[in-house]
Amino acid sequence: DQQVKQNSPSLSVQEGRISILNCDYTNSMFDYFLWYKKYPAEGPTFLISISSIKDKNEDGRFTVFLNKSAKHLSLHIVPSQPGDSAVYFCAASEYGGTYKYIFGTGTRLKVLA
Amino acid sequence: GAVVSQHPSWVICKSGTSVKIECRSLDFQATTMFWYRQFPKQSLMLMATSNEGSKATYEQGVEKDKFLINHASLTLSTLTVTSAHPEDSSFYICSAVLAGVETQYFGPGTRLLVL
């Protein structure tokens, strides 16, 4: 039972354009969502998070949107840079950012120069 | 700040041996640490929650007698894979919680290969 899903296993975007990564969840108890970036054989690096009381959070080139009614969140990266190429995981938690996370399946982003 | 280290970064062992993986929070105290496992091209799966001074809480399907977790101090949690078998070969990642910060900080991971 995959509670957090990322339906696009891969995405290619031209440098300078917008990258949109999507994530869907089924558990209505989730109240905190995060995006992590991961390179092979390394641990995930935190990018941005959002609480369920918000519908948008922005940090530099990264913006996360949350649609609770649709149980959907997305990460926008603009402008995309070649250094953004990595695997992106969304994660969800029932009790904020310090509780256990359920990770999505990941989306491999490739930004083409 | 908020650096988490893991040791070793990779290990190869024979089937039937036990392997210990350390997770350390280098510049902060972590009352809670988590252990995840990632198989190739798959997601990170939570194995257990480790709280300092108490028994770990294991996720459904994770054998507590096989994956021994000890969180003896506020900066160190260990995961011991007992009697390792080839199917235990995976990438093991720990994370730590910094009080007052709503996120987990992840270690670099440990790749285990059981022959």
Image (cartoon, rainbow, N blue to C red):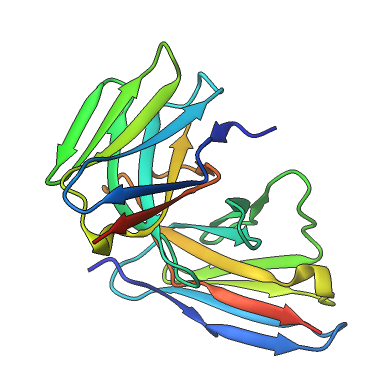
Q: Is B13 drawn above or below residue B86 in the view shown?
A: below
- Look at the image and tell me whether residue A95 can be seen: no
Foreground of the two, B49 or B35: B35
Q: Please, is residue B45 above or below residue A63 in the view?
A: below
Q: Residue at x 22, y 26 (%)?
A: A56
Closer to the camera in the image, A19 or B88 = A19
Relative side of B9 to B56, left or right: left
Q: x and y percent of residue B110 in the render?
A: 56, 76
Which residue reaches farthest right? B16
Q: Residue at x 58, y 84 (%)?
A: B10
For the point 31% across and 44% down, the residue is: B102
Q: Residue furthest top?
A: A69
Judge from the rendering whether residue B24 lies leftward or rightward of residue A104; answer left or right. left
B75 left or right, relative to B26: right
Horizontal side, residue B112 vs residue A78: left or right? right
Q: Quadrant of the N terminus of chain A?
A: top right
Q: Nearer the viewer, residue A87 or B109?
A: A87
Quadrant (top left, top right, bottom left, bottom right) of the C terminus of chain A: bottom left
